[in-house]
RNA sequence: GCCCGGAUGGCGGAAUUGGUAGACGCGUUGGUCUCAAACACCAAUGUCUUCGGACGUGCCGGUUCGAGCCCGGCUCCGGGUACCA
């Protein structure tokens, strides 16, 4: 028995290895199109000749194509990453053929959390891991044959680069936002204003409400003046509620949080009041909104940014409080419903809470404030439906009818938005309505016919009622009338609010740009410009100090002229907010980019990147661009004219289905011994097994596997079998896709993978095969579904990879990666190669004159390829090449006149094979600057057209007719045709529609 | 909940302005070549069919000579966003 089993195993082993060896031999013999040799040769040529270096000065028109630069992660590239790079490369190469001076650079966003987390674990300096990762990226990028101008590479973590990131920070620190001129200005103009007028006539963007005269200002100490100025700076230090992530030991910006958890790592985040550096992006809210109108981005991204900025128009109203001097200011978008107010709610963190709390309510309010503070951001978000609050005991006074309005606190009112207080109109706002129902408060209706029993009515149509002077007005008119009345009464004004918050800029981390600030007697001062960069110091550990200071505080002598330096670093988005300008300047002497280069290249014409940066990078770089423009450093105020968001490439995850077999045995001492075995059931067998619908065949297979498992115990231990039990609980387990061919699991590979962790696995096969489950999901290491481009390039070549990634589907759409499909594209390239070569692989391109038909195929393709590149429809472009190649193969066309043009056409997509064939056709220079073929209509002009003839809109037959026929002639010929007679069945047509050159439709 | 996309064969997708639905590729089936396999090549391939044809672009309805495309109403899927007053 044992011998027999071994024999069978040995036999199948031989069978399965034989064809593999043959396949390898075959590959070498069939290497007509030797992609690996070709691709290596031309990549070396491009590098040696600097083929793609953009000219510093040129008479040619400029065109700037940029990809969002990657963060060099340790995992390297997977096939999803190059998608956008391939598309941008095609466009860049196309523009070069059209005679543009193209700037197409690449670099690395090389500061960031993962390298630091790795450093904490291993002690390895982030610089070292980052450099290692960058060289992997570079190798992977190079082998795909991109036409990047590497001479302009940037790395955000190098001192030569971050010197200028720090320099921009200094500019922000030394600027304020003047609402009168509607731009950021030098702090000097603010100080001049203070010296002349104090705060009078000042229109500045600030959160503070300073009120002083010129004389006061002059009397202030340096420290007092510094404190005032701090509240106006574009980069400022302030106490604010921040998103603190204890697990990462740092604060996070709003866009770095998803569902109340940190985007990196998924750790909980809590609200904490801390002193932090922030950027006054809110000053630009309106301009960021307006700018969207003039840039060519997808509506989706524009909409996300609009929502993020969150403009809302309404009014601010202040309410008097009974028996108190305090006034509560609220913001509302519906001042027309002011008579519907039945209570007020202020945030638990509101500064008046303790003052408004009466003695009787003190205990309750204090308990509630404590409860609210204990909730994390995550809890607040997930428990939205939970209504909580408490009554302060105080009352506000209605400004129009003098009614008493109870003041409550509740955590549905956010301290950070508006004034942190609302006038509750339960009839018109669902949250107010829920609160009113829960605490049994009044719900007065203010719109005619309003039903307030089942919920709030936030319709902006209807006639106002029960509202004194607003009665009878439609909502939209009432809003205006209410604002007018509020202003006349002096209790408020029309106001616009934005949801956008100032961006927290400090990170309590090591691997980022140091903030060039030191504190002299507690006053923040900048490190002088000529002493930048302030380089990142060495530290003994990449962890906070014992007293909770950020890692930089561990550095020896982290000070400037004896004064302590700021210990926090800049966030990830600092370096990426301006990198597009650094690429413009090749020489990099002097400024962040030279005036000449900034003037020549202006902004990015075409930007490729993921939509996930909509509220982060894409907003911040717009902000910095506008700021640098205000300060006169840039002539443009939008960084990216056109934006394309490539879709994600999804992975094809594979699953095996594991059930646990428990066998019970008795040993010599007659004691029971339990053993557990992993049994893997093939997909359909597992499905039937779970549903208790196993077939007799399934049971035979199951029994086989169980017996096999038992045998391993028999043969190794001296035990007596008692019983076996197979669990009905089946776990679907993600497995590495390299162990699966199609949907069939290579069970030998599976057993030997992971150091043989599964060496004792048993399989229940379906017709001799183990079939895996599969699912399309995001490519990720943890799902073992990552496809590495290295493997593809090795097996099929870079040109195949490039074409295939484009062929997969529309660029902007998410689509699954399918390994089978790549063969088709590779086959196409081989077929393309054979247009130029015979069976013996000799070059057979001839000088013969092209036929009319061949020219027609060529020009049809020129037209299609041009149109497709222009509208970024690269998938249909690839199929046009396939059609063209198929047609020319059928025509047995090997003529230079045709093929030469075709090679230029395909160069953007498949540059290596194009260079090779171009070279073989006798050209000594790179194909990359050859003129793009011009479409000539004359080759497509036809003398006849195959008209589809429809009856009542249904196509029945086609008829070939000369194109110079008149409408009547067409109608006559069609109606007289045999086919028509058959369909007319002797009836007279009611109507005949003829569109010359297109269709004929007959109505019967 | 709100906002934005999308839904077409077994699969990825094509149809650019309302005018022959399913280009191109994969897969599948049959064939040629081969001792055999791989490669390559040829042919077929939306569904049903009484072989006449009928039906067919998520569902229901509308506009039109004609609708995958336009309009109205749904369903499902994907993305964004949320006590934002």
Image: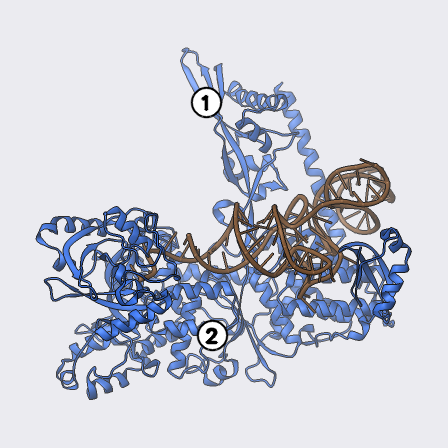
Chain colours: A blue, B brown
Query: At numbered mark 1, what does the secondary structure look like: helix, strand or loop?
Result: strand
Crowd class of label 2 (few under 14; some 14 to 19; many from 20; radius 10 Å): many
Question: How many residues crowd around disc 1 within 10 Å: few (fewer than 14), some, or many (20 or more)?
Answer: few
Judge whether A828 appears above or below B43 on screen.
below
Residue A675 numbered tag: 1
Q: Quadrant of residue A467?
A: bottom left
Between A499 and A648, the one lying in front of the other is A499
Note whether residue A415 is visible.
no
Q: Quadrant of the C terminus of chain A?
A: bottom right
Residue located farthest toward the left when viewing the structure as drawn: A359
Residue at left 69%, top 73%?
Answer: A927
Identify the element where label 2 is drawn. Answer: loop
Q: Horizontal and vertical percent for residue A645?
A: 53, 63
Q: Position of residue A245 (x, y in %)?
A: 30, 54
> A391 or A195, which is in the foreground?
A391
Q: Nearer the viewer, residue A10 or A418?
A: A418
In the rendered image, is residue A953 in sight?
A: yes
Relative horizontal placement of residue A228, taking residue A573 as reference (left or right): left
Do the numbered discs 2 and 1 sit on residues whose CB atoms are within 8 Å? no
| Mark seen at residue A639 | 2
Residue A163 pos. (x, y %): 37, 74
Residue A209 vertical placement versus A117 (above, below): below
Quarter of the image where the N terminus of chain A is located: top right
């Amino acid at each position: 028995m044992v011998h027999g089993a071994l024999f069978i195993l040995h036999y199948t082993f031989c069978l399965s290895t034989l064809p593999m060896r043959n396949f390898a031999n075959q590959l070498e013999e069939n290497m007509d199109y030797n992609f690996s040799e070709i691709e290596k040769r031309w990549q070396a040529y491009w590098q040696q000749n600097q083929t793609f270096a953009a000219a510093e000065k040129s008479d040619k028109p400029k065109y700037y194509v940029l990809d969002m630069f990657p963060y060099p992660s340790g995992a390297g590239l997977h096939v999803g990453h190059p998608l956008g790079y391939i598309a941008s490369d095609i466009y860049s190469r196309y523009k070069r053929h059209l005679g543009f001076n193209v700037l197409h650079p690449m670099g690395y966003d090389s500061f960031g959390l993962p390298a630091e987390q790795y450093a904490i674990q291993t002690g390895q300096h982030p610089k070292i891991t980052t450099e290692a990762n960058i060289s992997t990226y570079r190798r992977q990028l190079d082998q795909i044959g991109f036409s990047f101008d590497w001479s302009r590479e940037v790395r955000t973590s190098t001192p030569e680069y971050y010197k200028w990131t720090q320099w921009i920070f200094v500019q922000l620190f030394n600027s304020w936002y003047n609402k009168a001129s509607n731009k950021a200005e030098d702090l000097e103009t603010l100080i001049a204003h203070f010296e002349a007028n104090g705060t009078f006539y000042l229109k500045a963007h600030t959160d503070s409400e300073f009120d002083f005269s010129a004389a006061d200002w002059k009397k202030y100490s340096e420290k007092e003046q510094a404190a005032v100025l701090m509240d106006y700076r574009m980069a400022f230090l302030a106490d604010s509620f921040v998103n603190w992530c204890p697990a990462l030991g740092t604060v996070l910006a709003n866009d770095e949080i998803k569902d109340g958890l940190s985007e990196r790592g998924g750790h909980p985040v809590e609200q904490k009041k801390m002193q932090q550096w922030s950027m006054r992006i809110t000053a630009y809210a309106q301009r960021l909104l307006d700018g969207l109108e003039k840039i060519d981005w997808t509506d989706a991204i524009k909409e996300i940014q609009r929502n993020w900025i969150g403009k809302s128009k309404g009014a601010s109203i202040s309410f008097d409080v009974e028996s108190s001097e305090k006034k509560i200011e609220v913001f509302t978008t519906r001042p027309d419903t002011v008579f519907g107010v039945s209570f007020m709610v202020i945030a638990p963190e509101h500064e008046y809470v303790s003052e408004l709390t009466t003695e009787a309510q003190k205990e309750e309010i204090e308990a509630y404030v404590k409860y609210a503070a204990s909730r994390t951001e995550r809890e607040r978000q997930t428990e939205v439906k939970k209504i909580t609050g408490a009554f302060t005991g105080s009352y506000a006074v209605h400004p129009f009818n003098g009614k008493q309005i109870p003041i409550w606190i509740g955590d549905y009112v956010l301290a950070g938005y508006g004034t942190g207080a609302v006038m509750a109109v339960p009839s018109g706002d669902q949250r107010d309505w829920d609160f009113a129902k829960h605490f049994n408060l009044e719900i007065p209706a203010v719109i005619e016919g309003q039903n307030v029993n089942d919920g709030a009515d936030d319709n902006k149509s209807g006639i106002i009622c029960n509202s004194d002077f607003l009665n009878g007005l439609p909502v939209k008119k009432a809003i205006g009338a209410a604002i007018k009345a509020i202003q006349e009464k002096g209790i408020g004004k029309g106001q616009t609010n934005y949801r956008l918050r100032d961006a927290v800029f400090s990170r309590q981390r090591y691997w980022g740009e140091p903030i060039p600030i030191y504190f002299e007697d507690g006053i923040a001062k900048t490190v002088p410009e000529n002493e930048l960069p302030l380089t990142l110091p060495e530290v003994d550990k990449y962890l906070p100090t014992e007293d909770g200071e950020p890692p930089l505080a561990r550095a020896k002598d982290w000070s400037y002229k004896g004064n302590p330096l700021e210990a926090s670093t800049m966030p990830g988005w600092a370096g990426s907010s301006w990198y597009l300008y650094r690429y413009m300047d090749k020489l990099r002497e002097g400024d962040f980019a030279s005036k000449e280069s900034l003037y020549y290249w202006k902004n990015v014409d075409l930007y490729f990147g993921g939509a996930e940066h909509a509220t982060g990078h894409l907003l911040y770089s717009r902000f910095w661009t506008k700021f640098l423009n205000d300060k006169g450093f840039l002539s443009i105020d939008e960084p990216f004219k056109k934006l394309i968001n490539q879709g994600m490439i999804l992975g094809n995850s594979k699953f095996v289905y594991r059930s646990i077999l428990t066998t019970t045995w008795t040993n010599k001492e007659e004691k029971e011994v339990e053993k557990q075995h992993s049994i893997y059931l093939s997909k359909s067998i597992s499905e039937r097994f779970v549903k208790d619908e196993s077939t007799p065949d399934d049971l035979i297979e199951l029994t086989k596997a169980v017996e096999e498992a038992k045998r391993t115990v028999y043969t190794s231990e001296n035990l007596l079998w008692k019983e076996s039990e197979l669990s009905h609980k089946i776990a679907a387990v993600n497995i590495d896709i390299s162990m699966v061919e199609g949907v069939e699991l290579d069970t030998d590979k599976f057993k030997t993978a992971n150091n043989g962790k599964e060496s004792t696995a048993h399989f229940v096969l379906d017709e001799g095969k183990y079939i895996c489950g599969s699912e399309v999901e995001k490519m990720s290491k943890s799902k073992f579904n990552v496809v590495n481009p290295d493997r593809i390039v090795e097996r099929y070549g870079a040109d195949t990879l490039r074409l295939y990634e484009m062929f997969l589907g529309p660029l902007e759409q998410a689509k699954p990666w399918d390994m089978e499909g790549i063969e088709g594209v590779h086959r196409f390239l081989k077929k393309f190669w054979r247009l130029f070569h015979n069976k013996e692989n000799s070059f057979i391109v001839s000088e013969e004159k092209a036929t009319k038909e061949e020219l027609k195929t060529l020009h049809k393709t020129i037209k299609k390829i041009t149109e497709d590149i222009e509208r970024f429809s690269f998938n249909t472009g690839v199929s046009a090449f396939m059609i063209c190649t198929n047609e020319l193969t059928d025509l047995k066309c090997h003529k230079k006149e045709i093929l030469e043009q075709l090679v230029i056409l395909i160069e953007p997509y498949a540059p290596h094979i194009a260079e090779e064939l171009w070279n073989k056709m006798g050209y000594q220079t790179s194909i990359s600057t050859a003129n793009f073929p011009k479409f000539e209509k004359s080759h497509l002009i036809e003398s006849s057209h195959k008209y589809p003839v429809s009856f009542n809109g249904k196509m029945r037959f086609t008829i070939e007719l000369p194109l110079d026929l008149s409408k009547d002639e067409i109608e006559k010929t069609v109606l007289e045709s045999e086919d028509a007679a058959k369909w007319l069945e002797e009836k007279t047509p009611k109507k005949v529609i003829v569109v010359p050159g297109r269709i004929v439709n007959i109505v019967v």
